[in-house]
Image (cartoon, rainbow, N blue to C red):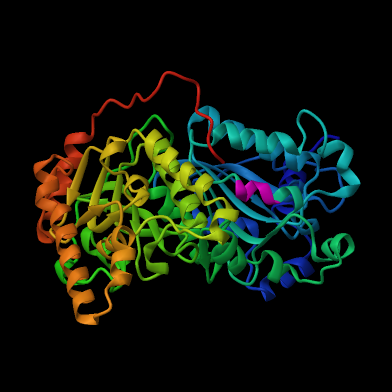
């Protein structure tokens, strides 16, 4: 078949239009944009270069085989991307779809460019399974390439609709996933399949909706109101990361911390009184620079990217507003993944400790708190980027280890005047040592005096000046001076040796 210019133009126009108008209308009624509109909103104007436009061109109703792939720039920095076209058989995968996705990930990896996934897909086309599923260039090769690229290039996903069955693993292998509330979903089996296999009656929203994954499962990282919000998350996320693992994170002009936040006033005198560590983080970092990740999941731990004097840092902070800041199974996993992400892409780590320790009890032991805690401590140990531990208020028990305490080769351990470092808090320690004696004292006043005396002795034993004199902490810093101290110390650690151990990799206690 020979094409003249007019015929080729007409073919290109038809392909770029996507599926039938009724599918465009149905998406618009749900607040969903066309795949090519999403790309246009995300990338720099005129920068997108498309590959595989004519994939499956001879097939009826399969323009571009339901996926748009190519290269563009975001804020002047090159990226590779793919976008499912849900107007074409609900964004389902055929053999050419799979090949296009594989090729663009391979290009991103080969050229050291971030990979962006704009996902809205009903999964594989069962009618094409022999062509797309089992072979060496089948769907499994997508995931193989994602795993190979993990930690080598940033991979970020914005999820606008379903990500079904095996296709759900595309978001799962990304660094972060932004999900549009009400439309986005991830699930291995549809609600109908679940009922058939297990007898459970459910809905896609209840089982795998955006809110479920961002607040309960932890597979989602950002819950977004609109598609524009999700695309903005992609843009902001990439602004903190280098193009690949060999480069430093991009610096930005220095911005002062917000002067309306008094760090000293934020921390209550009593360790029993909760405070919102997120406010502390925002008061410490450059103004408006904090991008919190997984804000709705495992909220006892706050993580995210920010800037100190224009330089990117990753923040791991205990938040006593939720569950007292105790580390649970989910918060240990949350920290583990974020620390590994920062270490992969050369982002220095700032730990802000206000931790009573790991949770105890039958329930968490059955969930494997020891295993999950060991995984977190493994990540802290293996991280070779500059890392600084700041004990804001307390670091008790193995919580000190989980927050990059002195034994884990931080570049500095800094204590605020409010800091306490101990195996456990004074009340718990006195009770553990003197429980029988306390119980034997019948007079309430005498009992209270005995406890108070022992508490005072314990507090003196763990006095922060004593710990500084013993070189357990490297500095005691007033809250108002902490930001400047961190800026200087991270600058000094920037060229540190990052070797760790003679081996291929450890055996992670997953």
Examine the image and state in which quarter residue 69 appears.
top right
Residue shown at 17% from the left, 66% from the top: 263
Point out residue 399 in the picture as x, y percentages from the top left corner.
35, 51
Q: Is residue 128 magenta?
A: no
Asked whether residue 405 is in view, the answer is: yes
Answer with left or right where residue 274 lies relative to residue 118: left
Would you place residue 98 above or below residue 354 in this image? Answer: above
Q: Position of residue 46 (x, y in %)?
A: 49, 49
- Depth check, front residue: 250 or 145: 145
Expressed as whole percent of the image width and height from the top left, the position of residue 281 reads 27, 61
Q: Quick check: 13 above or below 267?
A: above
- Image quadrant containing the C terminus: top right
| 97 shown above or below 37 | above
Give the magenta part as a residue range: 168-172
Q: Which is more toward the observer, 82 or 507?
A: 507
Name the residue at the top extreme: 502
Magenta segment, prevailing SS (helix, strand or loop) = helix
The residue shown at (10%, 58%) is 478
Q: Residue 49 location, x and y as percent?
A: 56, 42
């Amino acid at each position: 078949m020979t094409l003249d210019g007019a015929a080729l133009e007409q073919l290109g126009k038809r392909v770029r239009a996507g599926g039938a108008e009724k599918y465009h209308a149905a998406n618009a009624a749900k607040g969903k944009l066309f795949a090519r509109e999403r790309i246009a909103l995300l990338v720099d104007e005129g920068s997108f270069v498309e590959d595989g436009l004519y994939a499956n061109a001879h097939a009826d109703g399969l323009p571009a085989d339901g996926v748009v792939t190519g290269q563009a720039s975001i804020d002047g920095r090159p990226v590779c991307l793919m976008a499912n076209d849900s107007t074409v058989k609900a964004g389902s995968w055929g053999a050419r779809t799979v090949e296009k996705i594989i090729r663009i990930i391979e290009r991103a990896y080969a050229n050291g460019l971030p990979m962006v996934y704009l996902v809205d897909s009903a999964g594989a086309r069962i009618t094409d399974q022999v062509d797309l599923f089992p072979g060496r260039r089948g769907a499994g090769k997508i995931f193989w390439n994602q795993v190979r690229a993990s930690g080598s290039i940033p991979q970020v996903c914005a999820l606008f609709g379903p990500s079904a069955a095996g296709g759900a693993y595309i978001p799962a292998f990304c660094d972060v996933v932004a999900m549009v509330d009400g439309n986005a979903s991830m699930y291995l089996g549809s609600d109908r399949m679940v009922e058939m296999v297990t007898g459970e009656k459910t809905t896609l929203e209840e089982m795998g909706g955006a809110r479920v994954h961002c607040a309960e499962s932890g597979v989602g990282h950002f819950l977004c109101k609109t598609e524009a919000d999700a695309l903005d998350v992609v843009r902001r996320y990439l602004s903190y990361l280098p193009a690949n693992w060999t480069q430093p994170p991009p610096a930005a002009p220095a911005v002062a911390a917000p002067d309306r936040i008094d760090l000293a006033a934020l921390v209550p005198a009593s360790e029993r009184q909760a405070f919102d560590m997120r406010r502390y983080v925002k008061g410490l970092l450059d103004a408006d620079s904090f991008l919190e990740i997984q804000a709705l999941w495992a909220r006892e731990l706050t993580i995210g990217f920010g800037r100190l004097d224009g330089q990117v840092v990753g923040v791991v902070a205990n938040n006593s507003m939720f569950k007292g800041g105790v580390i649970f199974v989910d918060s240990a996993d949350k920290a583990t993944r974020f620390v590994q992400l920062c270490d992969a892409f050369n982002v220095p780590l700032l730990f802000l400790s206000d931790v009573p320790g790991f949770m105890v009890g039958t329930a968490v032991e059955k969930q494997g708190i020891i295993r999950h805690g060991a995984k977190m401590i493994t990540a802290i140990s293996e991280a070779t980027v500059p890392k600084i531990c700041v004990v804001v208020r307390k670091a008790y028990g193995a919580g000190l280890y989980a927050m990059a305490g002195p034994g884990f080769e931080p570049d500095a351990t800094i204590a605020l005047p409010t800091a306490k470092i101990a195996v456990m808090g004074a009340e718990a320690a006195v009770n553990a040592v003197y429980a029988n004696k306390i119980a034997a004292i019948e007079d309430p006043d005498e009992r209270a005096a005995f406890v108070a005396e022992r508490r005072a002795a314990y507090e003196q034993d763990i006095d922060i000046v004593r710990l500084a004199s013993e070189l357990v902490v490297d500095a005691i810093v007033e809250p108002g001076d902490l930001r400047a101290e961190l800026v200087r110390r991270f600058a000094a650690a920037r060229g540190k040796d990052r070797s760790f151990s003679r081996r291929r990799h450890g055996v992670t206690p997953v």
